[in-house]
Image (tube, rainbow, N blue to C red):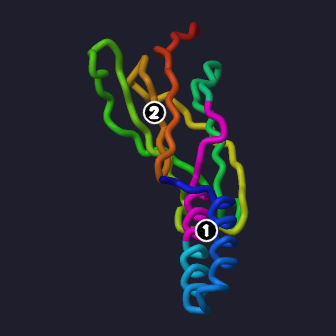
């Protein structure tokens, strides 16, 4: 069962109060465990996540705003395209693209937000349901229409 960082901190305070009766060994152990739990929760909350995603029909691009953490705002994002597949019922096409962070190992020191445009000019898998994925488990799905034929 997942626990929020605030709830974990509150339970740590209770454990510290109760430990004054049980001895210093329990206090040190409870503090260590709670500290590790808060650190893990904080790290998990700092993964790249989608703040906004939409399809720009006029420019044939997807516009992705990503919230991320790092030591600098200079992260760049790219797409790693999967295979175009038919949906399970065979009625439509589906494709997955993994959003890659150029500095994925950067320490989570500050929060940043960046908007990136990805051209769909060369995407032949259309119309399709596009699922964007970023680590660890964030997904965003949108419909990409058939390519429009522009007149000269």
Q: In the depicted view, which residue is nearer to us: 75 or 20?
A: 20
Q: In the depicted view, which residue is nearer to us: 88 or 54?
A: 88
Magenta segment includes 92: no
Magenta range: 37-53
Q: Is residue 62 above or below residue 27?
A: above
x, y (%) of residue 113? 71, 50
Cβ atoms at labels 1 and 2 below 8 Å apart: no
Circle 2 residues within 10 Å: few <14, some 14–19, many ≥20: some
Q: Dividing the picture into quarters, in which one does residue 103 lie?
A: bottom right
Q: Is residue 72 above or below residue 45?
A: below
The residue labelled by disc 2 is: 131
Instruction: Name the mark on residue 38.
Output: 1
Q: How many marks?
A: 2
Quarter containing the C terminus: top right
x, y (%) of residue 90? 27, 15
What whole-number distance in Å separates the C-alpha atoms at marks 1 and 2?
Answer: 31 Å
Q: Is residue 93 left or right of residue 118?
A: left
Name the residue furthest top. Answer: 151
């Amino acid at each position: 069962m997942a626990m929020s960082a605030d709830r974990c901190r509150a339970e740590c305070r209770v454990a510290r109060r109760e430990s004054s009766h049980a001895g210093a060994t329990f206090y040190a152990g409870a503090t260590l465990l709670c500290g590790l739990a808060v650190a893990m929760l904080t790290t998990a909350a700092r993964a790249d996540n989608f703040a906004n995603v939409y399809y720009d029909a006029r420019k044939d691009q997807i516009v992705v705003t990503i919230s991320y953490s790092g030591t600098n705002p200079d992260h760049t994002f790219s797409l790693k395209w999967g295979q175009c597949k038919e949906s399970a019922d065979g009625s439509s096409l589906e494709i997955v693209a993994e959003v890659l962070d150029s500095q994925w190992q950067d320490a989570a020191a500050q929060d940043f937000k960046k908007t990136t445009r990805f051209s769909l000019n060369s995407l032949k898998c259309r119309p399709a349901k596009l699922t964007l994925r970023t680590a660890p488990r964030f997904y965003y799905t949108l419909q990409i229409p058939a390519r429009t034929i522009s007149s000269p």
